[in-house]
Amino acid sequence: MNINRAGAGATLAVALLLTGCSDATSSTTPTSSSTASQTIAPSTSVSATGTQSDSPEAQAEAAVVAFWAMRDQLASDPKEGVTKLSDVARDQALDVHRRSLNAQAAQGWKQVGLTSVTPQSATATDKPGEYVVKACINVSKVNIVDSEGKSQVPPGRPAQSSYEYRVQRDGEKWFVVQDLLEAKPC
């Protein structure tokens, strides 16, 4: 990936968090019966491991929830740096979200509030230990503020959008490895 494309990806990730995607609607009714969501405080430690009793699908979904919990934690405290993101992400997802978090921190912005994540489905790919997880990402309680506390979120940002994540198992841990940042309605 060349530097211009990587920079554009980071800018796109920040823009999507701030504004959502034009394909997404601001519907507030989830279309899934799944109830998993992220409810941890930003200072809480995050794990992307599942228990022996969890199905691989449930573990893959939990990896996406853990990914967003870590992302929230790092965006809420930009001084913490982004190295912990590698505990829950690798490859393209790690690269694009690390760049996004660094770009946000460089602007002096930080996140206030937590993202709500509702997994919708997890489907195995042809690669062993790999799943595509669809999840509804709700940012209605998330604000991005500058150093003076002024919101940087434009009016009209969709409250929630659905995204697909490629998740891979490595030993007992799960990692989000791809996030193409393509929003669809939940």
Image (spheres, rainbow, N blue to C red):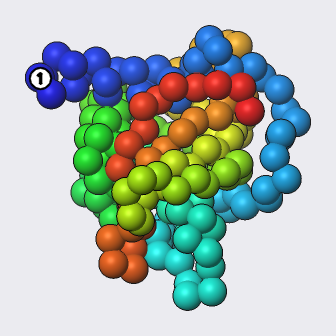
Q: Is the residue 94 above or below the residue 175 in the image?
A: above
Quadrant of the image containing the C terminus: top right
On screen, residue 155 versus residue 92, left or right, reads: right
Is 143 rendered above or below residue 154?
A: below
For the point 64% across and 40% down, the residue is: 137
The one of 109 and 100 positioned closer to us in this rendering = 100
The local crowd at label 1, few if under 14, some if 14 to 19, many if 20 or more residues have their Cα within 10 Å, is few
Where is residue 103? Give x, y as percent: 30, 30
Residue 54 screen position, x and y as percent: 62, 79
Answer with left or right where residue 105 lies relative to residue 185: left
- Residue at image mark 1: 2
* Circle 1: element type: loop
Total numbered circles: 1
Residue at 44 percent of width and 48 percent of height:
166
Which residue is at the far bottom? 52
Is residue 81 among the parts visible in the rendering?
Answer: yes
**Looking at the image, residue 75 lies above or below residue 27:** below
Q: Quadrant of residue 184?
A: top right
Q: Quadrant of residue 130?
A: bottom left
Instruction: Looking at this view, name the residue that lies furthest to the left.
Output: 2
Q: Amino acid at mark 1?
A: Asn
**Residue at 88 percent of width and 36 percent of height:** 29
Q: Quadrant for the N terminus, please.
A: top left
Q: Is residue 87 above or below residue 126?
A: below
Location of residue 139 (image quadrant):
top right
Residue 64 at least partly seen: no
Residue at 83 percent of width and 26 percent of height: 27
The percent coordinates of residue 155 (x first, y second) are 67, 13
